[in-house]
Amino acid sequence: MKATPSTSKPKLGPGEYKPDSAFKRIEDLPRPKLIKQRRNYAQRACPWCGKQAFRDRVFVRPLHDVGDLRSGRPQELRITYSQHYCSACRKCFSVDLSDLAPPHGDYTHRVMAVAMRLVVEDGLPYRTASWNLWRDHRVFVPFATIQNWVEAGGKRASERWESDYLDWALADCSGYLTADELYDGPFCVLSIVDNRTYKRLFYQVLAHDPTGADVLAFFQRFQAVLQVRQLTVRGITTDGSALYPSAIQTVWGALPHQICEFHVLKELNQASLRAVAQVRKQLAAQQPKLGRGRPAGAKRKLAQQRQRLQLKIAELFEHRYLFVQHQLSDSERATLLRITRGLPQLRALREIMDEVYRLFDRRCHTATALAKLARLRQRVQRFAQLSRVLKGLFSANVEKALTFLDDHLLGATSNAVERANRRFRKMQKTVYRVRTYEHIVNRLALDLFREATMHPRTATLNQLHAHRTGP
């Protein structure tokens, strides 16, 4: 006998995707669960004179709350509250409901808090946050309402971040800073980040490209904040911009100023790749020109030569990263020797890049690295073409990029502030409205308070893991 197919639905196992229920008609939506509360009093104290006022009228206020996850139904609060009339003041007042919802609001504080966390902490767009509220909490909030909440919260955060947030951020300030500017159309964001704790300390939004006076005023404002808390700056890391040296000298004097190692190496690597590209162009120009059709007779050798040159050009392009890669394996070094056969200038270029990377070895001091740099510059000057390509090696920024070798706490790169800039770019991708001066200021302030809650959140997760694993 043939086995009859089972009509029962397969059970979902761990890790299987189960989409949320779709409702195509209003009648199919789950009915809200009504929760009645009474705040109906016969007498209440007048908020102006303090005398007892008798009840005058009774109202019912509906509030949307976080839904019931067990039943999958929304929850709606029905608050029956009383309105009182003070005969002495001749004014009416209602019972205080501010612990449940803001005045004239339709949603409870719990709904607003969850919506704000979805946008600020999780970085969700407004429409996606609206769907997540319904899917995970069974409460529907229009995305425009969420946008109004976030903008209002950002405005309040921008008014108090210099007091509340800075108390937390500067509590364990290391004194080693990194500063950078971020351009966004007509606006510019100046930022200062702790290079040891990676905490954002100070920022300012400009409606124009920054000048030396803007950077000087920005540093002076931050120095005033440090003086109030009796903190000092021990070192600062910036990129190679000309905006910072004079401002740093004016505000902090002879402060160790480190130029970001990454930016210096980036310029030298790009110059090296341009040198390899020039060699490829020279090889392409050496290719013999052949007519159409299959070569015959004496043209066969020219065709073979053309094929060899084309193969050499293709290999130089495919393995161009070997000229700037920090460390090479044995197979990669063998490949480099093979593709540079007959090109001594490229082998010299790779040897020079090896010497450049050795300059930033933490095991030596700044004076030793500067002596190595002087010898390396003399060697590069022997090659006329390479000296023109690697002219960035003779810049004063290369010498300033070696300052960190004498201080093991001074950051070699400005990665801390670059991380903050990447966070801002990600926020702009999810919320396109962050393009005006006011919205940029407000969202940056909100993101600072998000950063302040990351450490307690990590501690909570660790405690939950420890509790789950048991003793």
Image (cartoon, helix red, strand yellow):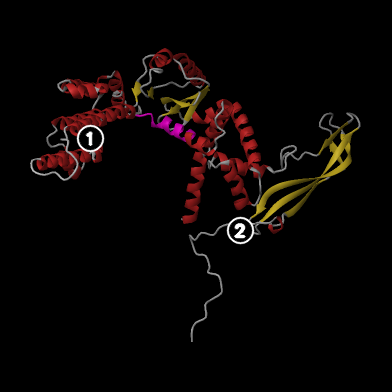
Residue at far right of view: 87
Q: Which quadrant would residue 28 be assigned to in this image? A: bottom right
Q: Residue at x 43, y 21 (%)?
A: 232
Q: Is residue 31 left or right of residue 235?
A: right
State which region is magenta: 413-424
Q: Is residue 89 left or right of residue 292?
A: right
Q: Main secondary structure of the magenta part?
A: helix
Q: Nearer the viewer, residue 175 or 187?
A: 187
Q: Residue at x 43, y 29 (%)?
A: 194
Q: Residues within 10 Å of mark 2 (few under 14, many from 20)?
A: few
Q: Residue at x 59, y 27 (%)?
A: 438
**Could you tell me residue 457's position as x and y percent?**
51, 43
Q: Amino acid at mark 2?
A: Ser
* Residue indicated by mark 2: 21
- How many numbered marks have been drawn onto this rendered protein structure? 2
Q: Earlier in the sequence, mark 2 or mark 1?
A: 2
